[in-house]
Image (spheres, rainbow, N blue to C red):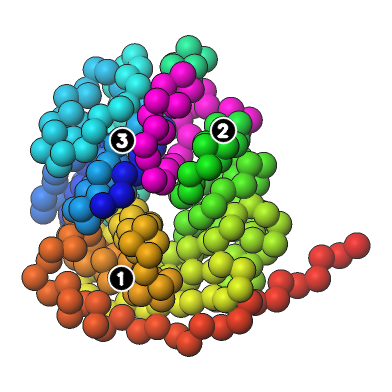
Amino acid sequence: MAKIICYTLNPAFDLAVTLPALRPGTVHRAQSSRMDPAGKGINVGRVLRRLGHAVRLGGLLGEDNAEPFGQLFRREQMEDAFVTVAGSTRINVKLAEADGRVSDLNGPGLTITAADWQRLLTAMPEQLAGMDAVVVSGSLPPGVDVEAFAQWLVALRASGLPIWVDTSGPGMQAVRQAGVHVLKPNEEELEQLLGRALPDTLALREAADEVLRLGWADQVILSLGAEGACWCDGTSLLQAHPPEVSVQNTVCAGDTLLAAALHGELSGWPRSRSLAFATALAAECVRHVGPGDPDAADFASLLAQVRLDAPSPKVSAPEMPE
Ligand SMILES: O=P(O)(O)OC[C@H]1O[C@](O)(CO)[C@@H](O)[C@@H]1O
């Protein structure tokens, strides 16, 4: 069992709505709706906890509607190390259609003051004490700029702990400045990081390799949705293809993938085993609302159906113009 701190700077309540089909500009009758405390680092923490690890949750949480988060943390036995800030945590709406498509409406989040940020920085050394790994997941809330986030990533790296990051938008600019150990983008986030379109699998693989070459990450785990995931560590590239499942809700798939891959690394597994395990758990996740469940009755069967490509040697990135 390892000890992991999972940071979420911009948590959210997820309002998951199911409906037959989304028709913009019309009134919909939802088939179901539910609201759960969520946010990327919290979802990652829930999966790690189910996999038997000790989880500490850090970040910035609105004090006005914090209680459902507290209930979740107590129920799932995760340590609450959030810094609370004035106001209410945002609500993100997830509209899931019958064909498996999900439309996300993610709010900006609470505006963080300089004093809030300072409290997070002050709490950090104590929060990192005794940990084996750090996860930083999710978007930056208003008030936390690229510079502040980059400096924070540098400070986290200085702890000597492995830093696993999943972020987007301005957070990606900070990754370029600070560099991280493991970066888990999806296709769109990798495009944001490199500032160009990546139209096919080869372009994505080359881009992942370029991220390593530029020193922005030591490893990249690229989530490719229905195509599975790639793990690129600078010497080889592994790709896993998921089993076919009935897709109900893809919202937590990336968080599940990251958590399961980290579990494999912390368990000392060969990377191919970790990637297959993570791909299977992400496939389990998309069958329902919420993070993947490693105790699902058919999980062993899902895992057996994951297909791994033979490792390909390092992809050579295109020559940069002079
Ligand atoms: O921080 P972001 O990028 O807005 O993402 C937050 C969303 O991501 C999720 O954690 C799923 O990955 C949701 O629970 C949450 O609404």
Give the position of the C terminus as an image quadrant: bottom right
Amino acid at circle 2 = Ala
Q: Residue 125 sits in which quadrant?
A: top left
Find residue 45 and report its image quarter.
Answer: top left
Of the numbered discs 3 and 2, the one sitting upstream in the chain is 3
- Real-space Cα separation, disc 3 to disc 2, in angstroms: 18 Å
Q: In the image, what residue occupies the spot 35% across and 22% down?
A: 83
Q: Is residue 180 left or right of residue 194?
A: left
Picture residue at 48% right of the left edge, 34% below the top: 140
Q: Earlier in the sequence, mark 1 or mark 2?
A: 2
Q: Which residue is tagged 1? A: 277
Magenta region includes residue 123: yes
Q: Residue at x 59, y 65 (%)?
A: 208
Specify the segment rendered in magenta: 120-149
In the figure, residue 57 lies in which quadrant? top left
Relative side of 18 to 55, left or right: left
Residue 233 coordinates in the image, percent (x, y): 56, 67
Residue 63 placement (x, y as % from top left): 27, 18
* Nearest the eye: 102 or 311: 311
The residue tagged 3 is: 57
